[in-house]
Image (tube, helix red, strand yellow):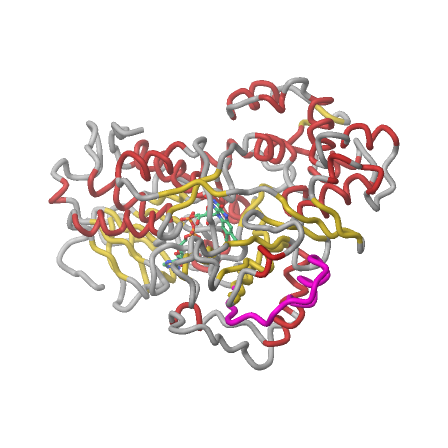
């Protein structure tokens, strides 16, 4: 990795969506006047460094053993038409095969009561929650999320029909709740000031996830929740094929990539280069400009000893988001037993207040070996599974498991407990799985699957400052963690595009 001859024009750190997008755009885009990059793409010396052995970051797609190509998505799995950069890359630039996928809820199992998910809206009186008459009326015909919509509409009439972030920002300007601007109120606090704890528990439990209604910045949580579009699409060969396609296009254009190259710090460079990027297999490289396409924990790991990142102001900005724990555990079965339930389940999800959270069904078209995302949970529930992570691994019996799958084998104790909770959720005895794999995104260098803005943070100011924290140092930060689209790959692309246009002098792309 050492290159003593001349500094790179640009070093990008992080081979997730934000890093691969930045590297590809910087290598192939047309420069505008004043760009720090050479006008001729062939002359641009760009290096992408990734600490792991693979491209993709928090997108990680593995074909499940024994199945006819069913893909287990351990990280991100879906996009909507509202994800404009993602959709354009898939449909206009690279023509990556994609398909829509069903996100309907089938069953819920709450406080020991099993119900079809349709009962959540159809019969609120049957729900094992002590809702007031008024709360029951809100849920009637619409489901538990109508409670959140009701609270939002009380604050900003018409807001749940907004289709753009701009509409939200204009409507929220000057709005206060309990005498405070929305950014200074936690979302959980806001909800409990509007309805009962029983109603809040119903909202939280029936989704199987907690982080969405956790105590994050109310001014971000509201638009985030209500701007989520539909329908959902995914990529046929796996969600991580998009960053991998970006990396391939970047390399084909002459860009350089080093895998297994962990950056330890970024320090002041020699006179002809702004910065030194330290770490990886060599001694490090000199760079005129550096983009760190990294989430909070990864930034904190390289901050000691790094320029800009080690200043008190920057430490505070880095801490302005919280990494939310999430785990996914997949099981394979010789037959899709869920299609034999009454009524049968083919696709979509079910949810419970048990620690497994949500499960999702992926049925083989030939009715053979199929895939179940058997547990998908967050925050406190994730720590439940951490406590069962030790002991002998669950063996995958399905033929020809990929090494990536086998490397993620959970403990036998974990699989036994998931099966016990699946039987409670579905109300029938279940066959033994033929394989298992799991991933908890709280480990280094991710520190969580999603990030949420903390209460009290001036988000537009921090989001902007991260793109170039110090005007005197050619160092930039992008990625979904510090975006207004957290938890979505679109947030990674949007912040990367801002860095590319504003600070690398690359013209806006014709396809977007
Ligand atoms: C469980 C889960 C579900 C999700 N669901 C969806 C979804 O349905 N749809 C959607 O669009 N998005 C979803 N997401 C979010 C999506 O994965 C992220 O938005 C996206 O991966 C962010 O990209 P990034 O480049 O900002 O960061 P990352 O993907 O985290 O990439 C950062 C990269 O930097 C590397 N790195 C870290 N430290 C160093 C270092 N010191 N040196 C070199 N390299 C380093 C990492 O190995 C990694 O490859 C989900 C994520 C998870 C985990």
**Which residue sits at x=59%, y=50%?**
345
Q: Is residue 424 magenta?
A: yes
Relative image position of residue 44 (x, y in whole percent):
16, 45
Give the answer, above or below, for where 360 lies relative to 387: above
Give the answer, above or below, for where 177 lies relative to 290: above
Q: Is residue 175 magenta?
A: no
Quadrant holding the C terminus: top left
> Left of 229 or right of it: where is 42?
left
Q: Residue furthest bottom?
A: 392
The answer to whether one can see residue 225 in this image is yes
Quadrant holding the N terminus: bottom left
Relative image position of residue 3 (x, y in whole percent):
18, 61
Observer-nearest of 226 and 270: 226
**Which residue sits at x=27%, y=62%?**
284
> Left of 165 or right of it: where is 14?
left
**Which residue sits at x=21%, y=36%?**
29
Give the answer, above or below, for where 445 lies relative to 160: below
Observer-nearest of 298 and 396: 396
The answer to whether one can see residue 442 in this image is no
Relative image position of residue 394 (x, y in whole percent):
54, 76
Q: Quadrant of residue 399?
A: bottom left
Q: Quadrant of residue 160?
A: top right
Q: Exactly how many numbered labels are in the figure?
A: 0
> Left of 173 or right of it: where is 264?
left
Please provide the residue range marked out in magenta.
418-438
Relative image position of residue 373 (x, y in whole percent):
55, 58
**Which residue sits at x=67%, y=58%?**
381
């Amino acid at each position: 990795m050492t290159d003593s001859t001349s500094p790179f024009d640009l070093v990008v750190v992080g081979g997730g969506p934000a890093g691969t997008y930045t590297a590809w755009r910087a290598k192939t885009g047309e420069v505008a006047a004043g760009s720090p990059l050479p006008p001729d793409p062939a002359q641009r010396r760009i290096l992408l460094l990734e600490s792991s052995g693979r491209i993709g970051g928090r997108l990680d797609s593995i074909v499940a053993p024994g199945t006819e190509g069913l893909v287990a998505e351990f990280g991100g799995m879906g996009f909507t038409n509202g994800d404009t950069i993602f959709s354009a890359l898939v449909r206009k630039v690279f023509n990556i095969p994609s398909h829509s996928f069903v996100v309907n809820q089938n069953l819920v199992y709450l406080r020991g009561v099993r119900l079809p998910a349709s009962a959540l809206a159809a019969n609120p009186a049957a729900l094992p929650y002590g809702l007031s008459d008024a709360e029951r009326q809100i849920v009637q015909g619409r489901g538990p999320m109508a409670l959140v919509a009701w609270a939002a509409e009380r604050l900003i009439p018409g807001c749940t029909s907004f289709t753009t972030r701009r509409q939200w920002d204009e409507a929220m300007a000057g709005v206060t709740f309990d005498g405070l601007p929305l950014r200074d109120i936690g979302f959980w606090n806001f909800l409990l000031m509007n309805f009962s704890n029983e109603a809040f528990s119903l909202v939280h439990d029936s989704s199987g996830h907690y982080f969405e209604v956790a105590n994050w910045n109310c001014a971000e949580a509201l638009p985030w929740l209500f701007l989520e579009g539909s329908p959902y699409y995914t990529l046929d060969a796996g969600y991580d094929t998009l960053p991998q396609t970006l990396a391939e296009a970047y390399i084909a254009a002459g860009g350089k990539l080093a895998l297994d190259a962990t950056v330890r710090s970024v320090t002041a460079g020699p006179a002809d280069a702004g910065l030194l990027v330290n770490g990886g297999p060599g001694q490090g490289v000199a760079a005129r400009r550096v983009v760190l396409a990294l989430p909070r924990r990864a930034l904190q790991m390289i901050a000691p000893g790094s320029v800009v990142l080690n200043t008190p102001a920057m430490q505070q900005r880095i801490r302005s988001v919280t990494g939310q724990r999430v785990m996914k555990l997949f099981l394979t079965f010789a037959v899709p037993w869920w299609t034999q339930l009454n009524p049968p389940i083919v696709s979509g999800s079910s949810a419970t207040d048990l620690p497994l959270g949500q499960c999702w069904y992926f049925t083989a078209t030939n009715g053979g070996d199929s895939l179940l995302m058997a547990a998908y949970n967050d925050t406190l529930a994730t720590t439940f599974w951490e406590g069962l992570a030790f002991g002998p691994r669950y063996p995958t019996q399905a033929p020809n498991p990929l090494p990536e799958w086998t490397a993620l084998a959970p403990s036998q104790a974990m699989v036994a407990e998931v099966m016990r909770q699946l039987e409670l959720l579905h109300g029938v005895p279940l066959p033994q799985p033929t394989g298992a794999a799991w991933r908890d995104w709280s480990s280094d260098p991710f520190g969580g699957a999603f990030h949420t803005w903390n209460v009290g943070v001036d988000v537009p100011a921090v989001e902007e400052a991260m793109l170039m924290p110090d005007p005197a140092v050619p160092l930039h930060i992008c990625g979904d963690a510090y975006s207004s689209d957290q938890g979505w790959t679109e947030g990674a692309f949007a912040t990367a595009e801002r860095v590319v246009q504003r600070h690398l002098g690359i013209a806006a792309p014709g396809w977007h």
